[in-house]
Image (cartoon, grey):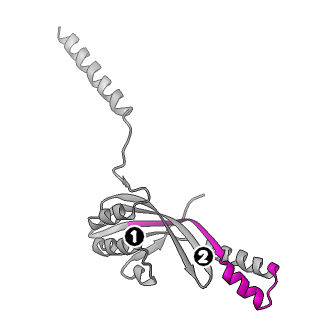
Amino acid sequence: MNKRIVTLGSLIALLFLATACNMPFTSGVKDCGEDMECFAEAAENCDPAKVLFTIDLEMMGVKIASTSYQEIVGKEDDLCLFKIRTEDVSVEFTEEAINQMLDMGLTQEQIDEQIAMTQEQANTGQLNQICRVDPERLATVMGQWEAGELSTDDWTGMDCEDVVEEE
């Protein structure tokens, strides 16, 4: 009788383990999709979260659309670990800017070269970094980005280093 109890107990334990091994793994990272408000809220407490952030800017006749993957990894000491990686950048000149270049005497071929060079510069300036930042500072910056307010000062107070991808 004792052998049957041990065998039955062993079978139940094996069944439990087999079931547990087939359970889907959840990483605990909140997927905010493209919702920056969701991501900014997660940043307040440095809760793990990820977001795809797209911003469209227009400066001096150049339209730039940039999409970045951002992730709050968690805390290290009292600082939040924040990853940011540029996924895509596209550059387009407005019709007005192209007309101004034509009025200055540039040929369409020269303008096309300028557009290609600007796109190449945008592609080489892509980010892939991990940053250590105070959670309150990160939440403030994410709230500003959500509102479409970007500044070079946003990086003040962030200790960032490049991430080197292995090939």
* Sequence order check, earlier mark of 2 and 1: 2
* Mark 1: amino acid: Glu
Seen in the picture, residue 33 relative to 116 is either above or below; the reply is above
The 10 Å Cα crowd at callout 2, few under 14, some 14 to 19, many 20 or more, is some
- The picture places residue 164, in percent across and down from the top left corner, at 53, 66
- 101 within the magenta span: yes
* Mark 2: amino acid: Lys
Q: Tell me where residue 157 sits by quadrant.
A: bottom left
Residue at image x 55%, y 62%?
165
Residue at image x 39%, y 56%?
32
- 24 within the magenta span: no
Q: Nearer the viewer, residue 155 or 162?
A: 155
Seen in the picture, residue 34 relative to 21 is either above or below; the reply is below
- Asked if one can make out residue 75 in the rendered structure from this viewpoint, the answer is no
Q: CA distance from mark 2 to mark 1?
A: 19 Å
| Label at residue 57 | none
Q: Which residue is mark 1?
A: 146
Q: Tag 2, which secondary structure? A: strand
Residues under numbered marks 2 and 1 in contact, where contact means CB atoms less than 8 Å apart: no
* Region of the chain picked out in magenta, as a range: 82-109
Q: Which residue is mark 2?
A: 63
Residue at image x 58%, y 74%?
64
Q: Tell me where residue 140 sits by quadrant.
A: bottom left
Q: Tag 1, which secondary structure? A: helix
- The picture places residue 96, in percent across and down from the top left corner, at 67, 82
Q: In the picture, which quadrant includes the C terminus?
A: bottom right
- The picture places residue 54, in percent across and down from the top left corner, at 50, 66
